[in-house]
Amino acid sequence: MRFLALLGMTSIKSFYIMVNYKNLGLVNTREMFARAVNGGYAIPAFNFNNMEQLQAIIMAAVETKSPVILQISKGARNYANQTLLRFMAEGAVAYAKELGCEHPEIVLHLDHGDSFELCKNCIEMGFSSVMIDGSALPYDENAALTRKVVDYAHQHDVTVEGELGVLAGVEDEVSAEVSHYTKPEEVVDFVTKTGVDSLAISIGTSHGAYKFTPEQCTVDPKTGRLLPPPLAFDVLEAVEKELPGFPIVLHGSSSVPQEDVDTINKYGGALKAAVGIPEEQLRKAAKSAVCKINIDSDSRLAMTAAIRKTLAEKPAEFDPRKYLGPARDHMKELYMHKIINVLGSNNKLAE
Ligand SMILES: [Zn+2]
């Protein structure tokens, strides 16, 4: 049943069609996470803000036969409008089918939801999964807020991601100066109290393209490039021991490909000492109970590198399709690489 609803809340005002995600052809994360945990791979969660990025994600997912999570952050909602983005996600399902995927598994996920009202609003708009990020709150307040969102979401069969521990770095409007690793002794209590379907933990990943300061890194003698400190796999293992088989999520898991950083700098950019998480470590995490890996910055770098290169090589070009097209191609390559070579979610559709 679809009907128009007018919401008059203070922070969220939108005039939209209230709809359940199932009517849009989207899926929640429950089954895909269970398969990913058992199968030793992770589902890609790619953020999107614009059409070219969404096209690249869907083309890559269809070509590799991978389930995929489309994430919408606060910055994306402010930039592109959340109503428009949600209709784009509906279009993405139809587009995947048009590209030949009979049963696409596409999740529309709210990244870093910061209030019950926002999560409720997104669920009513057709999101199939939401994150409630209460990680900056005291433990009991985080648990109570998360419980409230879970109670509402589960009435609509929408899955919920909670977070314990704090990631460093800057991602749109989410930022923290220092990270606090997740305390393994808290996870069972949190999951039991809240009923969340998955848990984002902090083990040393970080938001943005500048994940580590040069002082935190060592220099690779072979290449002269900065090597980041390793992820805290001991914390991940302790969490897994507490919650066997429970879906774990890693945020801030871009690898900051040096080729793209070099291309950007070669064609007039000024990225200094951008450092990401080595793909080898993410591969290792994907084989564990980590079943969702968030990647945003890498796609931004790929897009910017391709646009800078095209504009520098073809200075007379002024048709946006002529530089956004190569950017889309380059992002698609990146997404396919992540799916096949890092996460291992290729050929994992249920049917
Ligand atoms: Zn995040």
Image (spheres, rainbow, N blue to C red):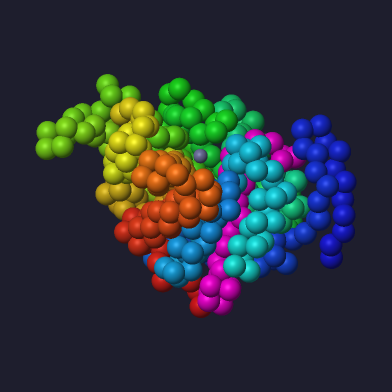
On screen, residue 224 versus residue 351, left or right, reads: left
Figure label count:
0
Residue 212 part of the magenta segment: no
Q: Nearer the viewer, residue 101 or 50?
A: 50
Q: Which quadrant: the N terminus? A: bottom right
User: Residue 346 in the image: x percent, y percent?
Assistant: 40, 67
Give the residue displayed 84% in from the left and 62% down from the top: 2
Quarter of the view holding residue 234: top left
Give the residue displayed 75% in from the left and 46% down from the top: 121
Q: Which residues are magenta?
A: 96-118
Q: Is residue 78 above or below residue 123?
A: above
Q: Nearer the viewer, residue 312 or 163?
A: 312
User: Residue 221 in the image: x percent, y percent?
Assistant: 12, 33
Q: Residue furthest front?
A: 316
Residue 105 part of the magenta segment: yes
On screen, residue 139 versus residue 87, left or right, reads: left
Q: Is residue 152 above or below residue 32?
A: above
Quarter of the view holding residue 12: top right
Give the residue displayed 76% in from the left and 52% down from the top: 124
